[in-house]
């Protein structure tokens, strides 16, 4: 499933961007103090949104893993991302803040417990998925939120098509270890790229804010490892990493389209290692306690 689902991202993103105006009343207005939560992939998309909203000057925005939400902290709105709508930490958090913080759930399946737990619900059923490993639901939800901030998404759609059509850089699939780097909103995307590699291909992967990579992680970088910058690298970093013998990857596409390339890498590495990317070890489609 995952390969078909990741291939449909350009169409899903276009549809989500078209929904933004109609769903605006369920999403924060400029100036609101916002928390955004999720688990796994959904948490990483939350990180990306929080950085994007702050960067666009629309108000204080904090991202949390749903299990780590600081109880009692005042927010005007809490956005919960959950493809399944059943993830325990998310459903319990919405119930805990009910009546105190206005909540919006962005979900893939409308017939789930989260619907009664949240004040407002946005259903992206056209981007729901059958696979355990999330690809298009997460990026489609982020595209809706990007469009809500007034950011253009057409280039991302065009770049996602390029990402799906262009061969992966030579030598990448053969690497034994992968590090993804980001800056600002792309730190969340780097985290998500690393999670895809873990889930779909059982690879050893890490993710860091780009400048942090120089503060220790670079010590284990060597030939046979790949370091992939999602977005624009800080000056000098590419040369420093290349000096270790590692493969340096930095595409010029929209960062969300770079994530699509990383999803493709996860599937390609799984295939090269004889693994089924639809059967991640010890993981279920929705984690319920
Ligand atoms: C969250 C999540 C996914 C992960 C796997 C298990 O799901 O942790 O990120 O890839 O599918 O569930 P959800 O709350 O977004 O449904």
Image (spheres, rainbow, N blue to C red):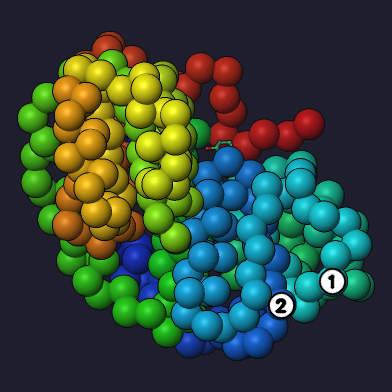
The answer to whether residue 41 is left or right of residue 286 is left
The disc placed on residue 33 is 2
- Residue at the image point whose x is 63% and y is 44% from the top: 39
* Ligand 1 within 8 angstroms of badge 2 C-beta: no
- Residue at the image point whose x is 44% and y is 51% from the top: 187
CA neighbours of label 2 inside 10 A, class few (<14), some (14 to 19), many (20+): some
Q: Quadrant of residue 206?
A: top left
Residue 198 at least partly seen:
yes
Is residue 232 shown above or below 167? below
Is residue 27 shown above or below 264? below
Q: Position of residue 184 (x, y in %)?
A: 44, 60
Q: In which quarter of the image is residue 59?
A: bottom right
Q: Where is residue 45 in the image (x, y as percent from the top left)?
A: 51, 55
Tell me the residue that label 1 is attached to. Answer: 74
Helix, strand or loop at mark 2 = loop
The disc placed on residue 135 is none
Q: Position of residue 55 (x, y in %)?
A: 48, 74
Q: Do the residues labelled 2 and 1 touch (CB within 8 Å)?
A: yes
Q: In which quadrant is the N terminus drawn?
A: top left
- Residue at the image point whose x is 13% and y is 37% from the top: 168
């Amino acid at each position: 499933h995952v390969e078909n689902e990741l291939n449909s991202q350009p169409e899903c993103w276009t549809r989500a961007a078209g929904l933004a105006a109609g769903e605006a009343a369920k999403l924060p207005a400029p100036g609101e103090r916002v928390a955004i939560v999720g688990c796994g992939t959904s948490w990483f998309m939350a990180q990306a949104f929080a950085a994007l909203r702050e960067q666009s000057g629309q108000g204080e925005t904090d991202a949390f893993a749903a299990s780590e939400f600081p109880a009692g902290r005042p927010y005007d709105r809490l956005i919960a991302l959950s493809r399944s709508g059943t993830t325990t930490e998310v459903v319990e958090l919405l119930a805990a803040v009910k009546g105190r913080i206005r909540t919006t759930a962005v979900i893939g399946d409308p017939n789930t417990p989260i619907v009664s737990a949240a004040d407002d619900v946005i259903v992206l059923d056209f981007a729901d998925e059958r696979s355990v490993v999330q690809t298009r639901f997460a990026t489609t939800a982020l595209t809706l939120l990007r469009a809500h901030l007034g950011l253009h998404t057409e280039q991302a759609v065009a770049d996602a098509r390029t990402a799906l059509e262009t061969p992966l850089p030579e030598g990448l699939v053969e690497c034994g270890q992968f590090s993804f780097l980001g800056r600002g909103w792309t730190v969340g995307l780097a985290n998500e790229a690393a999670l895809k590699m873990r889930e779909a291909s059982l690879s050893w992967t890490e993710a860091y804010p780009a400048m942090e990579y120089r503060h220790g992680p670079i010590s284990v970088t060597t030939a046979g490892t790949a370091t992939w910058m999602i977005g624009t690298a800080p000056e000098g970093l590419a040369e420093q990493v290349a000096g270790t013998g590692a493969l340096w990857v930095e595409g010029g596409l929209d960062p969300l389209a770079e994530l699509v390339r990383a999803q493709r890498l996860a599937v390609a590495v799984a295939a090269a290692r004889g693994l089924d990317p639809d059967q991640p070890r010890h993981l279920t489609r929705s984690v319920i306690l």
